[in-house]
Amino acid sequence: MKRIILIFLSSFALTANAQVKTLTLKDAVSYALQNKADAKKAKLEVENSEYKIQEVRSRALPQISANGNLTYNPVLQTSVIDGAAFGAPGTTIQATFGQKWTSGAGISLTQAIFDQSVFTGLRAAKSTREFYQINDQLTEEQVIERVANNYYQVYVQRQKLILLDSTFANTTKVRNIVKGQFDNGLAKKIDLDRIVVKMSNISTQRQQILNAVQLQENALKFYMGMPIETQIEIPQTEFEVTPAALTEAPNLGNRTEYLLLKKQEELLVLQKKSIEAEYYPTLSLSAGYNYLGQGPEMPLFAKPADGVYWSDYSAIGLNLRVPIFTGFGDQHENLWSYKNYA
C-alpha cells in the first residue's frame, strides 16, 4: 500500500512539473513589468525621489533639538587676579571659580530665513522626481520592446522548425519513391545517395533550429524575469495579422527618450545654480532656552538647601553668513561634483 502511495505521489509531482504555461503577449509583458529587476529598480527610484524631496524640504523647516549634560569637575581651575579689585593693591589673589557638579538641559530652534541653496535644491529635487518618472516610463517601454521582440522571435524559430519538418516529410516521400525506382532498376544509386544526404542535412538544420528555439525561449524568460525551468506555450492566435493604418506622422517631441534628455538638461542647469548658490549669503534665526544647575553635589536630585542652585537663561539671535574667501577649495570640489553628476 505504501509503495502504491509513493508511486501516486511521484506521478503527481511529475505531472505538476510537466505542466505547460500558456503565455500570451499581454501576459508576458505584464509578468515582465512585475518581476523584471530593471522595472522594479525604476519604480524604486521614483519612490526614492519622494524621500529626496522630503530631505531637501526639511532644510527649509524649523530644526528643533533638545540637549542635556552632566559634568563632574574633580579639580576646579584656579585663576590668579589682581588684589586691587578687592581693595588690596599690590597683592595677588588666587580664586577658584565654578562648582564640582554642573548640569544643564535645554531646547534649541534654528530656522532658515534665506538660503538660496535650499530653494534651488528643492527645485532640483522636484525635477529629479520627474526625471525618474520619465525614466520609469522609458524602462517600461524598453522592457515591453525586448519582451515583444523575443516573443515574436520564438514564434519565428518555431515556424522555421515547422517548415523544416514539412520539408523533411516531403523529402522522405521522395526518398521512398527513388528507393523504389532504384530497387526496380529505374534509378541510379547516386540519386538515392543524394536524397539521403539531403535528409541528413535537413536533420542537422532541424537540430540547430531546436537549439535556437530553446535559446530564444530562455532569452524571453530572462527578459521577463521568469525562471528558466518554466515550460511555456505560445498560442497561434497571438500571431494573427491585423491591418493598421498610420493616419498621422509620429510626434518626435513626445518620445520618452527625448523627454528624458530634456529633463536631464534641466537638472544639469539646476545643478549649476545649486553650486552658484553656495556663494550666496545665508540668514537664519536661532533661539534657545536652557536650565543650568550647579553645586557641590550632583544637581539632579539636590536642593538649594544642599548648596545646589538652578537658573534658566535663553537667547534669540539672527545669524548672517557671507562667503568671502575659501582658499579656492570650493572650486575643485564643485567642479568634481558637477562632473560626477553629469
Image (cartoon, rainbow, N blue to C red):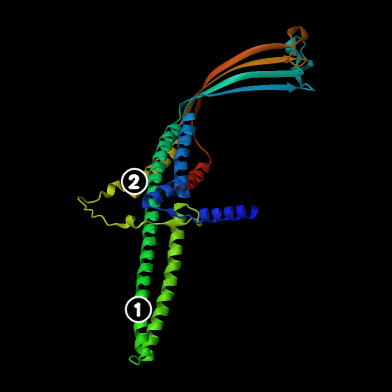
Residue at 68% x, 22% y: name it. Answer: 69
Q: Nearer the viewer, residue 225 or 13?
A: 13
- Residue 155, relative to residue 35: is it above or below? below
Question: What x and y, as percent, mark residue 62?
Answer: 50, 24
Question: What x and y, as percent, mark residue 295?
Answer: 75, 14
Q: CA distance from mark 2 to mark 1?
A: 60 Å
Residue position for label 2: 259
Residue at 40% x, 41% y: name it. Answer: 133
Residue at 34% x, 83% y: name it. Answer: 177
- Residue 220, relative to residue 204: is it above or below? above
The type of residue carrying mark 2 is Leu
- Give the SS element for disc 1: helix
Q: Nearer the viewer, residue 148 or 22?
A: 22
Other residues around mark 2 within 10 Å, as few (<14) / some (14–19) / many (≥20): some
Would you identify the image quadrant in which residue 174 lies? Answer: bottom left
- Give the SS element for disc 2: helix
Residue position for label 1: 173
The type of residue carrying mark 1 is Lys
Q: Which residue is most to the left?
A: 247
Q: Which mark is residue 92?
A: none
Side of 199 relative to 75 (left or right): left
